[in-house]
Amino acid sequence: MAIYITADLHLSPLTQDLNAAFKAFVDTLSHNDILILSGDLFDFYVGPDPSDSSQILVREILAAATRRGVKCYFQHGNRDFLLNKKEARALHLGLLPDLYVIQTPSGPCLVLHGDSLCTNDTAYMKFKRMVEKPWLQWLFLHLPLTLRRKVALSIRKKSLEAERADPKVYGVVRKTLAEVVKRYRVQNVVHGHIHLLGKYVNEVPDLNIRLSLGAWGSTFSYVRVDRNGIAIAQKPLDTLLKGQSATGRPARRAVSPIENLYRRQG
């Protein structure tokens, strides 16, 4: 039994390689494994869309995983914060709180998407506070689906055009990180959002490690938690597209302790 955490897949009908890679990745998971999709599973989500092939595929992939005894969970990201509990359940996902603590041999670990740690990005934080208002979400979700798609595409375009090179603006803010670590009493943090793979040690008081997941693209990354501790890995996407599992073994077989990772022993 192991816990797998990944984020920032940005699946859509146009991302055929990513969609296929996600299926191959999930197919490696075994009975009693736990999968946590920590935000931005979809490139954007504006409600259930019967014509969206990526939503259909995710539902089929996770239905098969659930039948095998894999427990699948989801946290909101900045692209799919509108996905509610009922809709998550239809995708065979349990909806976790946006900040969720898991127990590991290396101590308690906070799992979150990560956008809430980037508090120097004031424009985004203002946008986040606005779109989290229930009444605004209700109004938006009652617009015609075609209009919701157009709004999402417009926001997505502006996001792509934005300059994200300055880590002081778009990176994790240590003061915010320290406050979160203290509030949740954790020794480890795993997150995505910033699309930058990394392992950071002893950044703030009481925090042992922070593991930052990269976005899925030419590579994919994930964190694995097992009896040996917490590990993060990044591999070429072709590893999955060629029919191999995340650890290089054939799909659907149990995975051994991960090699070539950042590892903290428990």
Image (tube, rainbow, N blue to C red):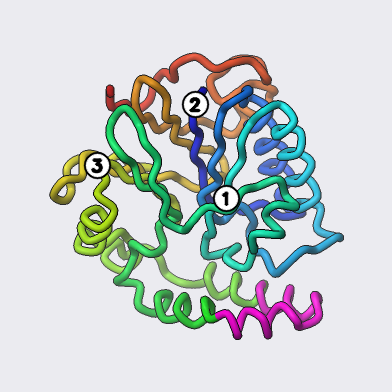
Q: Which residue is mark 1?
A: 74
Q: Position of residue 83 (x, y in %)?
A: 64, 63
Q: Does residue 209 appear left or right of residue 44 in this picture?
A: left
Q: Name the amino acid type tagged 2.
A: Ala
Q: Which residues are magenta?
A: 134-152
Residue at the right extreme of this rendering: 51
Q: Is 225 on the left-hand or right-hand side of 86?
A: left
Q: Are marks 1 and 3 in contact (CB under 8 Å)?
A: no
Amino acid type, label 3: Gln
- Side (left or right) of 153 relative to 5: right
Magenta stretch encompasses residue 130: no
Per the model, the C-alpha gap separating discs 1 and 3 is 22 Å
Assign the magenta stretch its main secondary structure: helix
Element class at badge 2: loop
Residue located 74% across and 73% down the image = 149
Of the image marks 1 and 3, the number of the one nearer the N terminus: 1
Do callouts 2 and 3 mark residues in contact (Cβ within 8 Å)? Answer: no
Task: Bin the neighbour count of mark 2 within 10 Å (Cα to Cα): few under 14, some 14-19, many 20 and up.
Answer: some
The residues bearing labels 2 and 3 have C-alpha atoms spaced at a distance of: 19 Å
CA gap between label 1 and label 2 equals 16 Å
Identify the residue at horizontal 66%, vertical 36% (top origin): 21
Binning the other alpha carbons within 10 Å of mark 1 as few (below 14), some (14 to 19) or many (20 upward) gives many
Report which residue position mark 3 lands on: 187
Along the polypeptide, which appears first: circle 2 or circle 3?
A: 2
Task: Please tell me which residue lies in front, 27 or 99.
Answer: 99
Earlier in the chain: of badge 1 and badge 2, it is 2
Q: x and y percent of residue 173 in the render?
A: 25, 62
Q: Position of residue 81 (x, y in %)?
A: 57, 65
Q: Is residue 149 left or right of residue 198?
A: right
Judge whether residue 136 is colored magenta. yes
Indicate which disc residue 2 carries.
Answer: 2
Residue at left offset 40%, top offset 57%: 114
